[in-house]
Structure formats: C-alpha cells, structure tokens
Amino acid sequence: MLHARLLSYLDEVARSGSMRKAAERLHVVPSAISRQIIALEEDLGTPLFDRTPRKLIPTAAGEIVIRHARATLKDFERSQDQIEELKGLHRGEITVAVMSGLAANVVPRAVTQFQQRNHRIKLHLRLLPTGDEILAAVASGEAQLGIGFDFPSRANVRVLEVALGKLGAVMAPDHPLANRLSLRISECLGHRLIVADKTMAIRPHLDQLFAKSKVEPHFSIETNSIEVMRHGAMSDQGITFLTPFDIEFELRTARLTYVPLYELAHHQQQLMLIGPENRMPALTAVFVESLKGVIQEALRSEVFVR
C-alpha cells in the first residue's frame, strides 16, 4: 500500500491540477510533493500526470493510481471513525441470533474472549430454531448478528464469514464404532439413532442418505434440540449426526467422538455468520472478529483436517 502522505498528495494534485495549489492546501512546500510523485513515477516506470502549461492532468496510469489512493483514504477514514467510536464507548449491547448447537460451543468461546477485553458489554444470545427466523431477526434489526448453517440469500443481510464442516456420525468414545476412520450410513442403522427432526437444517441431508441406503431406519429419538442429540450420544450409547462445529467443546474434552461418513466425503455444510447489509457499529465489528477467530481456530483442529 502506498504511504498515507503520498496518497494525500496524489489526491490533492489530481483535484487542484497543480502541485503549488496542492501544497498550499496541504500546508507543505511544493518540492516535497514533486519529489514524491516523481519518485513514484520512476518506480512505476510511467508518468502519472501530463504536465501541460496550465494544468497537471492524470494519465491513464495516473487515473488507476488515484482511484487506489482515494479508495485507500476512504477505508482509512472509516477505520479512524470506528476507532474513535470505540474510544468513547464504555457500555453497550449486542444481540446475536444463534442456531441450536452453536449456542454451547463456538459462540460461548467467542463471547468469553470478547468480554475479557470488553467486560462492560452485554451480549444477548437468542436461540432460534430455524434459519429463516435468524435471517428475519438480522434483516429486521432485532439482532445485529446471526450464526447458523446453510442460510439462503436474503435482502438486507450480508454474509460476513463462511466455514465448511462435514456432517458425520457422533458417539461416545467407548462406542463400538468410535475407533473407525470412517463409516457408511448403513453401518449405523443397527445402533440406537438420535436424529434431528424435520424442522432442522441437518434433516434434509440425513433423509437423502437414508433414501440412498434403501434401508428403512428406526429412530430412537427425533428432536429439534442439539443438546438432546449430544447428551443422547454421550449417555445412551447412541449415534447422532452433527458437524464438528456442533460438538467442538465435547471434542476438545473427549466427551464425544466424530467419525466421518463415507457418503458425505464430498459434501459440506456451510457455517455462516451474517449481519446487516449496512455498516455495523464498531463494537459489533470487533465481536465479529472474535467470532471469526474462534471459527478459524476450530477449523485448525484435527477433526476438521482429516
């Protein structure tokens, strides 16, 4: 990136058409501007201005560099505004709409890290059962952020981060199948199955798998609660089907084991962090970075790189 002072010189010379006028407006001597622009032209191997008797006119190369300069200056101004906003902020609140499962794993870790540095900021975590409800909460402004799986596109909402995780078989470490490197869905059918019900984003993927197996599955439990699925797998020798994001804490503490499914080797669910289409407050932007950091840390764990 070009030096900030040189960016200002280029912008002002292009606006005024004169190094002398630019120097007057920037309160520097004309030679300081001239030296830096000439040095940049020598580095690039092309003139940035046509020097006519009346005016300096940007060349085609100059237009490119000036566009870059102005875009960079605008970005820097926005960053300064956000920093000033943070300086004066001692209290605040952020509402996050969360899909079931993530409320006990990725999100709490990000919250802890964020509040260690911003202990006066209150976070509202709203557990919503469907992606449509999370999208609606963010689009309406009821929530500043939303996090969940496989959101469709929607007006007034933008995607801030995407991470990929494969749906797999989840069970207790002492389960008979826990030491397998991968499983076919048919191998799971003889065991106690605890599955997501039809209101959850996971279920369509499971229905496709069971349909391909051509075996009628028997479900011991159908639920819209990831918590029930996790505890059923931990305590009742059951098998459930989740992504590593849903059981990130249980994996780290060796309470559950994740085994990839052969049939889903090339299929991944999208963990998505969404926010409003317009500019978000500085405080929310800082929390977004905490969430992104925890997501990326989870992606580096062994279970994601198998």
Image (spheres, rainbow, N blue to C red):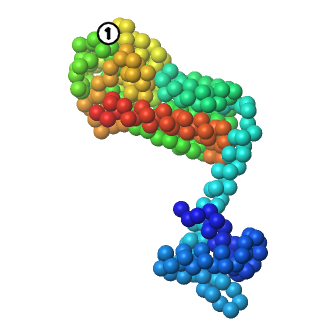
Q: In screen coordinates, is 223 left or right of 93?
A: left
Q: Residue at x 70, y 78 (%)?
A: 30
Quadrant of the snapshot with the C terminus: top left
Q: Amino acid at mark 1?
A: Gln
Q: In screen coordinates, is 294 left or right of 38?
A: left
Residue 268 on image: x %, y %: 37, 36
Q: In screen coordinates, is 176 left or right of 39?
A: left
Residue wearing tag 1: 237
Residue 70 on image: x %, y %: 63, 65
Q: Label 1's element?
A: loop
Q: As rendered, which of 45 and 130 lies closer to the eye?
A: 45
Residue 54 on image: x %, y %: 71, 89
The crowding category of the residue bearing disc 1, from other C-alpha atoms within 10 Å (few below 14, some 14 to 19, many at least 20), is some
Q: As rendered, which of 37 and 195 lies closer to the eye?
A: 37
Residue 76 higher or lower than 28, as above or below: above
Residue 99 on image: x %, y %: 52, 27
Residue 147 higher or lower than 160, as above or below: above
Residue 110 higher or lower than 79, as above or below: above
Q: Which quadrant would residue 282 be assigned to in this image?
A: top right
Q: Residue at x 61, y 77 (%)?
A: 35
Q: In screen coordinates, is 138 left or right of 242?
A: right
Q: Residue at x 35, y 33 (%)?
A: 304
